[in-house]
Amino acid sequence: MARKWEINEGVYAWNMEQCEELLLIAGYEEIKPNIAPGLKWPDEFENHFYQHGNGIACYLLDEINAVRRRLVLPRLDYQETDVLEYGRSTNKLMKSETRRRVRADLASVGLDSRQKMVARALEETKALVPPHIPYEEYKSRRQQFSADSLLSRAEVARRVRASQQATAPLLAPEPAKPASLPLEKAVVMLKYAKDPELRSGIIAKMSSDDALLAVEKIDDTDVRDALIRHSLAAA
C-alpha cells in the first residue's frame, strides 16, 4: 500500500491512495482520545496531514501504532504499491480538503456505517498492484547511475591525459638556439683569422647586436662588411 519516498537521508514517508488515507484517518481518530497530553507528534501529524496535505512520515506512523499497540488494537501496516492518479497528485490543497472531509464523514456516521467504510477501504487496498520498482531498488539504481557517471567523467579525464602524454613526444621540439659567441672573444678571433671560411663561422656564432658593435673594432673592410650583413640578416 502507498508509495514510499525519502524526505531526508534515512527518513521515509508514504504517499497514499484515498482508500489508504481513510484507514489512516479512521485508525488515528480511533486512538486520538487516548493519546497522552503534552506530546508534540499529534500536532505535527495533524498539521502535515490535515492542514498541508503532505504525506505521512514513517516515524509519525510509528507513533500512532505505538498507541494502538498499547490499546491492543491492530497495527496500521503499509506496503509499497504502484501509485494511481490521487497518489501521484501534487495538489496538496485538494488532498488536505479531502482528508478533512473524510474525517468529518467518519465522525458523522454511526459505528455500523463507519465499519462498512473501513471494510470497503480495506478491500480497495488489497486490489492495489505491487510497485513497478520498489523504492530501495530505485534508490540503489540512482546511486549506481551517479557512481557510474562519476567514473565515466574520471575515465574521460584519464583518457585525455593519456592522449596528451602519448602525443607530446611526437611534437617537434623547438630548435635550440645556437650559443652566442662573446663579443670580445669574437673580435680577437676575427682580427687574427685569415681564412674566409673561418671568419664566416665566427661571425655566424655572434648575435646581431654584437656583430654591429664589432664593426667599429675591426679594421678589415671585408670582415666589417660581413659583420654588417650578419646584423642585417638577423634584424
Image (tube, rainbow, N blue to C red):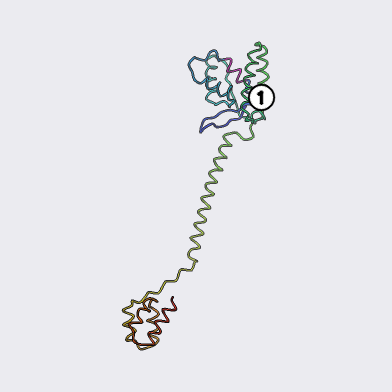
- Nearest the eye: 172 or 206: 206
Name the image quarter holding the N terminus.
Answer: top right
- The kind of secondary structure element at disc 1 is helix
- Nearest the eye: 3 or 92: 92
Question: 206 left or right of 112?
Answer: left
Task: Give the prevailing secondary structure in the magenta stretch.
Answer: helix
Task: Return the x and y of residue 219 as percentages of the image width and height.
Answer: 34, 86
Task: Return the x and y of residue 24 as percentages of the image width and height.
Answer: 60, 21
Q: Amino acid at mark 1?
A: Lys
User: Which residue is depicted at the point 54% across and 14% down?
Assistant: 71
Task: Return the x and y of residue 43 as percentages of the image width and height.
Answer: 52, 20
Q: Which residues are magenta?
A: 23-30
User: Which residue is depicted at the point 58% across and 16% down?
Assistant: 29
Residue 25: within the magenta? yes
Question: 128 left or right of 65?
Answer: right
- Nearest the eye: 30 or 123: 30
Say few, some or many: other residues with alpha carbon within 10 Å of mark 1 (under 14 / 14 to 19 / 20 or more). few
Instruction: Name the quadrant containing residue 75.
Output: top right
- Residue most extreme to the front: 216
Residue 124: within the magenta? no
User: Which residue is depicted at the point 58% across and 37% down?
Assistant: 138
Name the image quarter holding the C terminus.
Answer: bottom left
Q: Which residue is mark 1?
A: 126
